Amino acid sequence: MKKKKVRSAAFILTSILIACLVSGCGPRERADIELLNISYDPTREFYLEFNRAFAEHWREKTGQSVIIRQSHGGSSRQARYVIDGAPADVVTLALAYDIDAIAREGLIDPDWQRRLPFNSAPYHSTLAFLVRRGNPAGIKDWGDLAREDVSVITPNPKTSGVARWNYLAAWGWAAREFDDDEDLVRDYITRFYRNVPVLDTGARGASTTFMERGIGDVLVNWENELLLALRRRGDDFEIVIPSVSIRAEPTVSLVDRNVDRRGSREAARAYLEFLYSDFAQELAGRHFFRPSDPRFLDKHRDRYPQIEMFTVDEKFGGWEPATEKHFRDGGLFDRIYLAR
């Protein structure tokens, strides 16, 4: 009974939080259709533009007005909100595994990733480092992040999608550096996290900690987040490209149970399909995401640093085994972080 009460309280708190996030806790604008997109941290600016364009597209197509409300945060935490009852019509999250977690609760069709092109990933990204202008700490590659004199800012893998990508990218580099000697790899990862003074819940919070609060020598984050920071404050920071990184593929899906209950399936499906339109692929490129459509990736290629990338499947056998080994409660990350 106590467990049920705790879960009920969490559900109520989540509902209130989501309501405030998407409505501002004030008067709500009315439309023929309302959609809620629960997304990960650094997509706010992209979806503000995308939502306006989709609303115009939908009105021209159907004559209906549509409002899209947004919620942003650490990807794994956002997935938990949906599982706990947040009324998302669509999820646009940093990890396919987070959408799989929602699917395991019966909210999303288990075959969701086959419903849209490119395995339901309308764009991809990778990870790099942001350092202060002049790179005073001399950061050059992943190995420098384990030095005793370096302070590293990266979010919490228990709540953040990019934090899991960061962890796996660092692990993949170390596995190559130390010829897959797991003891040496674990020692490196332990020293890496020993240098992390703050574990923010998401990518944008980590950016704020580094850029606004002035904590840390290096920020490990989404490529698009770092390029956006450089565009805004290029006099203060510079980007360092590591020798190798990971191909990160954020994915999207309908929340089937919710759209059927709310009668929003047609509009929600069109919303996700519009992510593959020429307009959206061009917009993704302008926001420093790497478009999945090769035409637009080639068009914007000069925006992206050249970097060698590996995939989760290649290095870890996919998200299921990677999560089971590294990120489950009591997994390697928990043990490494406690052993710092």
Image (cartoon, rainbow, N blue to C red):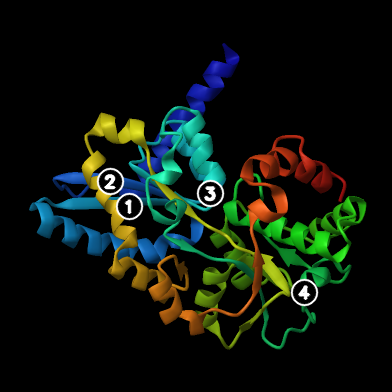
Q: Which residue is mark 4?
A: 141
Give, as a three-letter code, the residue at label 2: Ala
Quarter occupied by the N terminus: top right
Q: Which residue is mark 2?
A: 268
Earlier sequence position, callout 4 versus callout 3: 3
Secondary structure of the residue carrying numbered label 3: helix
Between the C-alphas of marks 4 and 1, the distance is: 36 Å
Q: CA distance from mark 1 to mark 3?
A: 18 Å
Q: Is residue 307 above or below residue 29?
A: below
Q: Residues within 10 Å of mark 3 (few under 14, many from 20)?
A: many
Q: Secondary structure at mark 4?
A: loop
Name the secondary structure under disc 1.
Answer: helix
Q: Choose mark 3 or mark 2, whichever is in front.
A: 2
The amino acid type found where label 4 is placed reads Asp
Q: Mark 4 and mark 2: span between their CA atoms?
A: 42 Å
Q: Estimate the x, y position of residue 292 in percent, counting from the top left.
A: 44, 65
Establish if 314 lies above or below 298: above
Q: Are marks 4 and 3 in contact (CB under 8 Å)?
A: no
